[in-house]
Image (cartoon, rainbow, N blue to C red):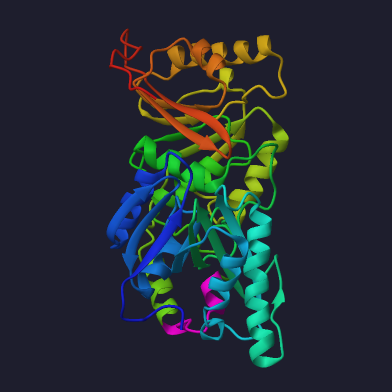
Amino acid sequence: MIFNNNKYEKIIVKTFHGLEETLAREIEELGGKEVRTEIRMVSFRGNKELMYKANLALRTALRVLLPFKTFNSRHPDNLYRQVKNIDWSEFFSAQKTFAIDSVVNSKYFPHSKFASLKVKDAIVDQFREKTGKRPSIDTENPDVRISLHIADSVCTLSFDASGDSLHKRNYRLEKTRAPLNETLAAGLILLSGWRGDKLFLDPMCGSGTFSIEAAMIAKNIPPQISRKSFGFFKWKDFDWKLWEKVFAEAKSNIVEKTCLISASDISKKSIEIAKGNIKRAGLSGDINISAADISNLTIDSDEGTAIINPPYGERLKEENIFKLYREIGDKLKKDFSGFDVWIFSANKEALKHIGLRTSRRLTLFNGQLETKFHKYEMYRGSKKVSKSITDSG
């Protein structure tokens, strides 16, 4: 038994740095109790049904973990003994496969792979001694995925309820260069405040991730609607009827509404890739997409939200990237009157060349890359530059 049906257990959800508060609000809306934000994660208490819902419905989640054992250890041999003292037959049999994922920040365990190896050895040795058989390791598609987290001397073992990372929505089979993570894209849209009530512009759409995530938000489509399997499907106590109930309820809450979403990109290849991804997401009728340079883009609305993810400059010379950002700023001044425009970029120097005052400045991390998310309120008429006090960030 991994999850007590009638008991509220502690559940941990991982996310990107900067999206913790957004994820916490999502969890509260699902019904999570005792919601607490930490660095790159949010913890809460919930029952099995809520754990299923979290995997299906949370847009800003990367993984859902169920902690089951916490202890102190300062030596690899002690780690081995404490793990071996757990009765692993309660959770899976020797016929199952398993994998260990480790996150280690400890002077006592300088190498995460070595810590993983000690946990793996303890589990395998226990099964071999008790049954004469040993479970196999499968790092790609295990029956049970176990997460090991070590902070200084505090060791926490958790079961990974998600399996594959929850950023995978199964619509993006083709990618452009440096595609934006789907979880991060959804989080940026939620941070922008857009919920489908006005036009959404994605003028540098790449593989279409912003537009697809926006349409799913507007129509209340669960982000994992197309996923065929989760980690908890293989748990001993998986409740298929409960899962069918959760899935049916989520599907019944999808809103059949007309989306006002327009995507474009200068690259015709990117447009073809985006069209394929949009089609796989079942959103071809919800997103208008065309090949266009942002500087030549025709804006047919006097209000809306735009999110722009321009190149950061890895493949462009410095003078060219600054020129591009100046052109974006000029376009915003000229044609985006009435819009809230957000720009997501890791190039701090290039952002200065936008030439507009920000009304909000947020800092997030795209992997290890510190990235800025700046808001520009484009007022109508002559008052095109926001006079709001800029946030720190």
Front residue (pair 97, 389): 97
Residue 288 location (% of width, % of height): 53, 40
Is 280 drawn above or below residue 376 in the view shown?
below
Quadrant for residue 199, please give it: top left
Looking at the image, residue 208 sits to the left or right of residue 359; the answer is right
Residue beneath the point at 63% across and 76% down: 123
Residue 69 location (% of width, % of height): 45, 69
Quadrant for residue 12, please give it: bottom left
Front residue (pair 361, 341): 361
Residue beneath the point at 51% across and 61% down: 73
Q: In which quadrant is the C terminus drawn?
A: top left
Quadrant for residue 267, please give it: top right
Residue 142 showing in the rendered view: no
Q: Is residue 231 magenta?
A: yes
Residue 140 location (% of width, % of height): 70, 65
Q: Give the magenta part as a residue range.
A: 230-241
Looking at the image, residue 316 sits to the left or right of residue 34; the answer is right
Q: Is residue 75 magenta?
A: no
Residue 265 location (% of width, % of height): 62, 31
